[in-house]
Amino acid sequence: MANDREKGDWKDSVWNPRTREFLGRTASSWGLILLFYLVFYIFLAGLFSLTMYVMLQTLDDHKPTWQDRLSTPGMVIRPHAHETFEIVYNIQNTESWDMYAQALDKFLSPYNDSIQAQKNHECTPDQYFQQEDSGDVKNNPKRSCQFNRTILDVCSGMQDRYYGYQEGKPCIIIKLNRVIGMLPGKNGQAPFVTCGAKKYKVGKDQWREDTEKIGELVYYPPNGTFNLMYYPYYGKKAQVNYSQPLVAVKFLNITQNEDVNIECKIHANNIPAGTERDKFAGKVSFKLRINTNN
Ligand SMILES: *[C@@H]1O[C@H](CO)[C@@H](O)[C@H](O)[C@H]1NC(C)=O
Ligand SMILES: *[C@@H]1O[C@H](CO)[C@@H](O)[C@H](O)[C@H]1NC(C)=O
Ligand SMILES: *[C@@H]1O[C@H](CO)[C@@H](O)[C@H](O)[C@H]1NC(C)=O
Ligand SMILES: *[C@@H]1O[C@H](CO)[C@@H](O)[C@H](O)[C@H]1NC(C)=O
Ligand SMILES: *[C@@H]1O[C@H](CO)[C@@H](O)[C@H](O)[C@H]1NC(C)=O
Protein backbone atom coordinates (compact mmCIF):
# COMPACT_ATOMS: atom_id res chain seq x y z
CA MET A 1 0.00 0.00 0.00
CA ALA A 2 2.69 2.40 1.08
CA ASN A 3 4.53 1.52 -2.08
CA ASP A 4 1.57 2.43 -4.29
CA ARG A 5 1.22 5.78 -2.63
CA GLU A 6 4.87 6.61 -3.04
CA LYS A 7 4.59 5.80 -6.73
CA GLY A 8 1.59 8.09 -6.96
CA ASP A 9 3.49 10.90 -5.26
CA TRP A 10 6.35 10.53 -7.63
CA LYS A 11 4.07 10.62 -10.64
CA ASP A 12 2.30 13.63 -9.23
CA SER A 13 5.53 15.48 -8.85
CA VAL A 14 6.01 15.28 -12.62
CA TRP A 15 2.51 15.97 -13.70
CA ASN A 16 -0.18 16.63 -11.13
CA PRO A 17 -3.57 16.47 -12.84
CA ARG A 18 -5.40 17.90 -9.83
CA THR A 19 -3.48 21.15 -9.58
CA ARG A 20 -2.43 21.02 -13.25
CA GLU A 21 1.22 21.46 -12.24
CA PHE A 22 4.15 20.24 -14.27
CA LEU A 23 7.25 19.60 -12.15
CA GLY A 24 5.62 21.55 -9.39
CA ARG A 25 4.75 24.62 -11.41
CA THR A 26 1.71 25.73 -13.29
CA ALA A 27 1.84 26.64 -16.96
CA SER A 28 1.76 30.37 -16.25
CA SER A 29 4.55 30.02 -13.72
CA TRP A 30 6.67 28.22 -16.33
CA GLY A 31 5.77 30.84 -18.88
CA LEU A 32 6.95 33.62 -16.62
CA ILE A 33 10.23 31.87 -15.96
CA LEU A 34 10.87 31.35 -19.67
CA LEU A 35 9.95 34.93 -20.38
CA PHE A 36 12.30 36.13 -17.66
CA TYR A 37 15.25 34.20 -19.06
CA LEU A 38 14.45 35.23 -22.61
CA VAL A 39 14.50 38.90 -21.66
CA PHE A 40 17.56 38.38 -19.52
CA TYR A 41 19.59 36.77 -22.30
CA ILE A 42 18.49 39.29 -24.90
CA PHE A 43 19.67 41.97 -22.53
CA LEU A 44 23.06 40.26 -22.06
CA ALA A 45 23.51 39.81 -25.81
CA GLY A 46 22.64 43.45 -26.34
CA LEU A 47 25.09 44.59 -23.71
CA PHE A 48 27.84 42.44 -25.23
CA SER A 49 27.22 43.76 -28.74
CA LEU A 50 27.20 47.32 -27.52
CA THR A 51 30.53 46.91 -25.69
CA MET A 52 32.06 45.19 -28.71
CA TYR A 53 30.80 47.92 -30.99
CA VAL A 54 32.22 50.69 -28.86
CA MET A 55 35.55 48.83 -28.58
CA LEU A 56 35.84 48.32 -32.32
CA GLN A 57 35.10 51.97 -32.95
CA THR A 58 38.23 52.88 -31.04
CA LEU A 59 40.45 50.56 -33.12
CA ASP A 60 42.17 51.70 -36.26
CA ASP A 61 42.41 49.16 -39.06
CA HIS A 62 45.75 50.47 -40.10
CA LYS A 63 47.79 50.67 -37.00
CA PRO A 64 47.87 48.84 -33.70
CA THR A 65 46.37 50.67 -30.74
CA TRP A 66 49.01 49.25 -28.43
CA GLN A 67 52.55 48.51 -29.41
CA ASP A 68 55.38 47.28 -27.28
CA ARG A 69 59.06 48.03 -27.69
CA LEU A 70 58.58 50.92 -30.02
CA SER A 71 62.18 51.98 -29.92
CA THR A 72 64.01 48.67 -29.85
CA PRO A 73 63.50 46.51 -32.90
CA GLY A 74 65.22 43.16 -33.25
CA MET A 75 67.52 42.25 -36.10
CA VAL A 76 67.70 39.08 -38.10
CA ILE A 77 70.17 37.62 -40.55
CA ARG A 78 69.81 35.70 -43.75
CA PRO A 79 70.55 32.99 -44.60
CA HIS A 80 69.46 31.23 -41.48
CA ALA A 81 69.62 27.49 -41.62
CA HIS A 82 67.98 25.03 -39.27
CA GLU A 83 66.45 27.75 -37.12
CA THR A 84 69.84 28.53 -35.65
CA PHE A 85 72.08 31.47 -36.26
CA GLU A 86 74.90 29.28 -37.34
CA ILE A 87 76.49 29.19 -40.74
CA VAL A 88 78.83 26.29 -41.16
CA TYR A 89 80.02 24.86 -44.43
CA ASN A 90 82.93 23.45 -46.33
CA ILE A 91 84.17 25.30 -49.39
CA GLN A 92 84.97 22.14 -51.32
CA ASN A 93 81.61 20.59 -50.53
CA THR A 94 79.22 22.39 -52.86
CA GLU A 95 76.19 20.86 -51.21
CA SER A 96 77.15 22.32 -47.85
CA TRP A 97 76.82 25.92 -49.08
CA ASP A 98 74.47 25.68 -52.01
CA MET A 99 71.51 25.81 -49.63
CA TYR A 100 72.70 29.17 -48.31
CA ALA A 101 72.91 30.59 -51.81
CA GLN A 102 69.46 29.23 -52.57
CA ALA A 103 68.02 30.69 -49.40
CA LEU A 104 69.44 34.09 -50.32
CA ASP A 105 68.10 33.79 -53.88
CA LYS A 106 64.66 33.16 -52.51
CA PHE A 107 64.88 35.91 -49.92
CA LEU A 108 66.12 38.50 -52.42
CA SER A 109 63.76 37.61 -55.21
CA PRO A 110 61.13 40.26 -54.28
CA TYR A 111 63.91 42.85 -54.39
CA ASN A 112 64.60 42.30 -58.10
CA ASP A 113 64.93 45.70 -59.71
CA SER A 114 62.15 44.97 -62.16
CA ILE A 115 59.76 44.07 -59.35
CA GLN A 116 60.74 47.07 -57.26
CA ALA A 117 60.29 49.38 -60.25
CA GLN A 118 56.81 47.97 -60.77
CA LYS A 119 55.62 48.02 -57.15
CA ASN A 120 57.42 50.87 -55.50
CA HIS A 121 58.20 54.49 -55.76
CA GLU A 122 61.51 56.23 -56.34
CA CYS A 123 61.88 58.29 -53.21
CA THR A 124 64.16 61.14 -52.32
CA PRO A 125 67.00 59.61 -50.35
CA ASP A 126 68.26 60.77 -46.94
CA GLN A 127 64.94 62.03 -45.65
CA TYR A 128 61.91 60.38 -44.05
CA PHE A 129 59.13 59.52 -46.47
CA GLN A 130 56.19 60.78 -44.48
CA GLN A 131 52.65 60.25 -45.71
CA GLU A 132 50.48 61.39 -42.86
CA ASP A 133 46.71 61.22 -42.85
CA SER A 134 44.98 64.55 -42.77
CA GLY A 135 42.71 64.17 -39.79
CA ASP A 136 40.11 61.50 -40.47
CA VAL A 137 40.89 61.40 -44.17
CA LYS A 138 43.15 58.44 -44.57
CA ASN A 139 45.97 58.79 -47.00
CA ASN A 140 45.82 55.10 -47.97
CA PRO A 141 47.26 53.08 -49.56
CA LYS A 142 50.62 54.59 -48.84
CA ARG A 143 53.49 54.29 -51.25
CA SER A 144 56.75 52.52 -50.44
CA CYS A 145 60.27 53.19 -51.59
CA GLN A 146 62.25 51.04 -53.96
CA PHE A 147 65.00 48.93 -52.51
CA ASN A 148 66.73 47.55 -55.57
CA ARG A 149 68.55 44.29 -55.25
CA THR A 150 71.49 45.74 -57.17
CA ILE A 151 72.20 48.09 -54.25
CA LEU A 152 73.73 45.05 -52.58
CA ASP A 153 76.34 44.94 -55.32
CA VAL A 154 78.48 41.78 -55.08
CA CYS A 155 76.12 40.52 -52.37
CA SER A 156 73.09 40.85 -54.65
CA GLY A 157 73.63 37.47 -56.25
CA MET A 158 73.49 39.05 -59.69
CA GLN A 159 77.17 38.98 -60.72
CA ASP A 160 78.24 36.43 -58.12
CA ARG A 161 75.53 33.77 -58.09
CA TYR A 162 76.86 32.11 -54.97
CA TYR A 163 77.29 35.21 -52.84
CA GLY A 164 80.95 34.47 -52.21
CA TYR A 165 80.28 31.23 -50.35
CA GLN A 166 82.19 29.22 -52.93
CA GLU A 167 85.39 31.20 -52.27
CA GLY A 168 85.13 31.55 -48.49
CA LYS A 169 84.00 35.19 -48.66
CA PRO A 170 80.36 34.84 -47.72
CA CYS A 171 77.72 37.55 -47.67
CA ILE A 172 75.30 37.82 -44.77
CA ILE A 173 72.20 39.91 -45.11
CA ILE A 174 70.80 41.82 -42.17
CA LYS A 175 67.39 43.31 -41.71
CA LEU A 176 65.78 45.26 -38.95
CA ASN A 177 62.37 44.08 -37.82
CA ARG A 178 59.50 46.30 -38.78
CA VAL A 179 58.27 48.73 -36.19
CA ILE A 180 55.30 50.84 -37.10
CA GLY A 181 55.98 54.54 -36.88
CA MET A 182 59.64 54.23 -35.94
CA LEU A 183 61.87 57.09 -37.03
CA PRO A 184 65.39 55.77 -36.49
CA GLY A 185 68.41 58.00 -36.71
CA LYS A 186 68.64 61.56 -35.54
CA ASN A 187 69.64 64.87 -37.04
CA GLY A 188 69.42 63.46 -40.53
CA GLN A 189 71.95 60.76 -39.79
CA ALA A 190 70.86 57.37 -41.05
CA PRO A 191 71.09 54.30 -38.82
CA PHE A 192 73.88 51.93 -39.78
CA VAL A 193 75.08 48.45 -39.00
CA THR A 194 78.49 47.31 -37.87
CA CYS A 195 79.66 43.79 -37.25
CA GLY A 196 82.45 42.68 -35.02
CA ALA A 197 83.58 40.01 -32.63
CA LYS A 198 81.11 38.82 -30.07
CA LYS A 199 82.30 38.46 -26.53
CA TYR A 200 81.51 35.00 -25.29
CA LYS A 201 82.03 33.13 -22.09
CA VAL A 202 84.62 30.37 -21.81
CA GLY A 203 84.28 29.20 -18.26
CA LYS A 204 83.77 31.13 -15.08
CA ASP A 205 84.43 34.87 -15.41
CA GLN A 206 86.48 34.26 -18.51
CA TRP A 207 85.53 35.93 -21.73
CA ARG A 208 86.95 35.69 -25.17
CA GLU A 209 86.38 37.33 -28.50
CA ASP A 210 87.48 36.43 -31.99
CA THR A 211 88.54 39.89 -33.13
CA GLU A 212 91.65 38.82 -34.96
CA LYS A 213 89.81 36.05 -36.83
CA ILE A 214 87.17 38.21 -38.47
CA GLY A 215 89.34 39.89 -41.07
CA GLU A 216 88.21 42.70 -43.30
CA LEU A 217 84.53 43.39 -43.81
CA VAL A 218 82.73 45.35 -46.45
CA TYR A 219 79.17 46.61 -46.25
CA TYR A 220 76.53 47.21 -48.91
CA PRO A 221 75.09 49.77 -49.27
CA PRO A 222 78.28 51.69 -48.31
CA ASN A 223 78.72 52.20 -44.56
CA GLY A 224 75.94 49.67 -43.89
CA THR A 225 73.22 52.29 -43.71
CA PHE A 226 69.46 51.92 -43.72
CA ASN A 227 68.43 54.96 -45.68
CA LEU A 228 65.99 57.29 -43.92
CA MET A 229 63.59 57.19 -46.84
CA TYR A 230 62.42 53.71 -45.79
CA TYR A 231 60.95 55.16 -42.59
CA PRO A 232 58.46 55.48 -41.11
CA TYR A 233 56.68 52.21 -41.78
CA TYR A 234 52.91 52.52 -41.61
CA GLY A 235 51.87 48.87 -41.25
CA LYS A 236 50.98 46.04 -43.57
CA LYS A 237 47.53 47.25 -44.39
CA ALA A 238 48.37 50.86 -45.10
CA GLN A 239 51.62 50.19 -46.89
CA VAL A 240 51.02 47.00 -48.81
CA ASN A 241 54.16 46.97 -50.95
CA TYR A 242 56.67 47.90 -48.27
CA SER A 243 60.13 46.41 -48.80
CA GLN A 244 62.34 46.37 -45.76
CA PRO A 245 65.73 47.89 -46.42
CA LEU A 246 68.67 45.52 -46.13
CA VAL A 247 72.34 45.66 -45.35
CA ALA A 248 74.76 43.06 -46.63
CA VAL A 249 78.09 42.37 -45.02
CA LYS A 250 80.78 40.44 -46.82
CA PHE A 251 83.61 38.71 -44.96
CA LEU A 252 86.70 39.16 -47.11
CA ASN A 253 89.35 37.38 -45.06
CA ILE A 254 87.76 35.39 -42.28
CA THR A 255 89.88 32.74 -40.59
CA GLN A 256 89.04 29.31 -41.89
CA ASN A 257 88.58 26.03 -40.06
CA GLU A 258 87.68 27.84 -36.85
CA ASP A 259 84.51 29.01 -35.17
CA VAL A 260 84.11 32.76 -35.35
CA ASN A 261 81.50 34.40 -33.15
CA ILE A 262 80.11 37.54 -34.67
CA GLU A 263 77.76 40.21 -33.48
CA CYS A 264 76.13 42.88 -35.61
CA LYS A 265 74.63 46.00 -34.09
CA ILE A 266 72.49 48.86 -35.21
CA HIS A 267 73.72 52.36 -34.46
CA ALA A 268 70.97 54.89 -34.49
CA ASN A 269 71.50 57.00 -31.40
CA ASN A 270 67.79 56.72 -30.66
CA ILE A 271 67.63 52.93 -30.74
CA PRO A 272 69.14 51.74 -27.49
CA ALA A 273 71.02 48.54 -28.28
CA GLY A 274 70.82 45.67 -25.83
CA THR A 275 69.01 47.26 -22.92
CA GLU A 276 68.50 45.31 -19.73
CA ARG A 277 64.93 44.65 -20.68
CA ASP A 278 65.69 43.04 -23.99
CA LYS A 279 69.24 42.13 -24.75
CA PHE A 280 68.41 41.11 -28.30
CA ALA A 281 67.14 44.52 -29.24
CA GLY A 282 69.15 46.18 -31.94
CA LYS A 283 71.64 43.39 -32.37
CA VAL A 284 72.07 39.90 -33.71
CA SER A 285 74.81 37.38 -33.21
CA PHE A 286 75.75 34.26 -35.08
CA LYS A 287 78.53 31.76 -35.56
CA LEU A 288 80.37 31.46 -38.81
CA ARG A 289 82.66 28.55 -39.57
CA ILE A 290 84.14 27.99 -42.96
CA ASN A 291 85.97 24.76 -43.40
CA THR A 292 88.40 23.98 -46.14
CA ASN A 293 90.34 20.87 -47.03
CA ASN A 294 93.39 22.82 -48.13
C1 LIG B 1 64.67 37.78 -59.66
O1 LIG B 1 65.85 37.75 -60.45
C2 LIG B 1 66.51 36.49 -60.45
C3 LIG B 1 67.80 36.64 -61.21
O2 LIG B 1 67.65 37.41 -62.36
C4 LIG B 1 65.57 35.45 -61.09
O3 LIG B 1 66.19 34.19 -61.09
C5 LIG B 1 64.28 35.39 -60.27
O4 LIG B 1 63.37 34.49 -60.85
C6 LIG B 1 63.66 36.76 -60.15
N1 LIG B 1 62.55 36.68 -59.25
C7 LIG B 1 61.35 37.10 -59.53
C8 LIG B 1 60.29 36.93 -58.49
O5 LIG B 1 61.10 37.62 -60.62
C1 LIG C 1 65.71 50.42 -59.37
O1 LIG C 1 65.82 49.76 -60.59
C2 LIG C 1 64.93 50.26 -61.58
C3 LIG C 1 65.04 49.35 -62.79
O2 LIG C 1 66.37 49.21 -63.18
C4 LIG C 1 65.28 51.70 -61.90
O3 LIG C 1 64.39 52.21 -62.87
C5 LIG C 1 65.18 52.51 -60.62
O4 LIG C 1 65.58 53.83 -60.85
C6 LIG C 1 66.01 51.91 -59.52
N1 LIG C 1 65.68 52.58 -58.29
C7 LIG C 1 66.60 53.07 -57.46
C8 LIG C 1 66.11 53.74 -56.25
O5 LIG C 1 67.78 52.99 -57.70
C1 LIG D 1 51.67 47.78 -55.15
O1 LIG D 1 52.16 46.99 -56.20
C2 LIG D 1 51.24 46.76 -57.24
C3 LIG D 1 51.91 45.91 -58.30
O2 LIG D 1 52.33 44.69 -57.74
C4 LIG D 1 50.81 48.09 -57.86
O3 LIG D 1 49.82 47.86 -58.85
C5 LIG D 1 50.22 48.98 -56.78
O4 LIG D 1 49.92 50.24 -57.32
C6 LIG D 1 51.23 49.14 -55.66
N1 LIG D 1 50.61 49.90 -54.58
C7 LIG D 1 51.14 51.00 -54.08
C8 LIG D 1 50.39 51.68 -53.02
O5 LIG D 1 52.23 51.44 -54.48
C1 LIG E 1 80.51 56.67 -45.10
O1 LIG E 1 81.03 57.21 -43.90
C2 LIG E 1 82.09 58.11 -44.08
C3 LIG E 1 82.62 58.51 -42.71
O2 LIG E 1 81.61 58.66 -41.79
C4 LIG E 1 81.62 59.31 -44.89
O3 LIG E 1 82.69 60.20 -45.12
C5 LIG E 1 81.09 58.80 -46.23
O4 LIG E 1 80.55 59.88 -46.95
C6 LIG E 1 80.02 57.76 -46.01
N1 LIG E 1 79.65 57.20 -47.30
C7 LIG E 1 78.38 57.13 -47.69
C8 LIG E 1 78.16 56.58 -49.05
O5 LIG E 1 77.46 57.47 -46.98
C1 LIG F 1 94.09 37.74 -44.07
O1 LIG F 1 94.24 37.46 -42.70
C2 LIG F 1 95.49 36.89 -42.34
C3 LIG F 1 95.49 36.62 -40.83
O2 LIG F 1 94.33 36.00 -40.44
C4 LIG F 1 96.62 37.84 -42.70
O3 LIG F 1 97.86 37.23 -42.42
C5 LIG F 1 96.52 38.20 -44.17
O4 LIG F 1 97.48 39.17 -44.49
C6 LIG F 1 95.15 38.73 -44.52
N1 LIG F 1 95.04 38.96 -45.93
C7 LIG F 1 94.61 40.11 -46.45
C8 LIG F 1 94.55 40.18 -47.92
O5 LIG F 1 94.26 41.03 -45.74
Image (cartoon, rainbow, N blue to C red):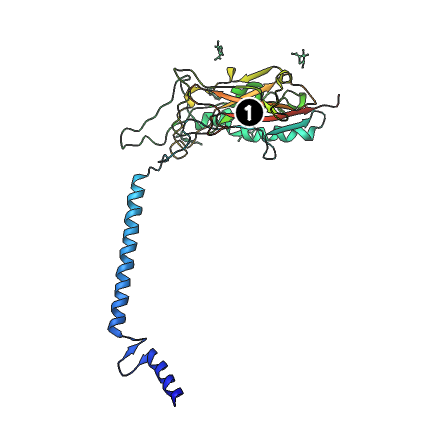
Q: For the C terminus, which image quadrant?
A: top right
The image quadrant that residue 166 belongs to is top right
Left or right of 286 on screen, residue 294 = right
What residue occupies the far front of the structure in this picture?
204
Q: Position of residue 171 (x, y in %)?
A: 59, 22
Q: Residues within 10 Å of mark 1 (few under 14, many from 20)?
A: many
Q: Which residue is mark 1?
A: 173
Answer yes or no: is residue 122 visible. no
Q: Where residue 119 sits: x, y (%)?
A: 44, 28
Q: Secondary structure at mark 1?
A: strand
For badge 1, the amino acid type reads Ile
Horizontal and vertical percent position of residue 173: 55, 25
Q: Nearer the viewer, residue 29 or 122?
A: 29
- On screen, residue 286 above or below 41: above
| Residue 186 in view | yes
Rendering coords of residue 98 (x, y %): 65, 29
- Residue 197, by quadrant, is top right
User: 217 or 245, which lies in front?
Assistant: 217
Which residue appears at 62% of the width and 18% of the height?
214
The N terminus lies in quadrant:
bottom left
Toward the bottom, the furthest residue is 1
* 88 in relation to 38, above or below: above
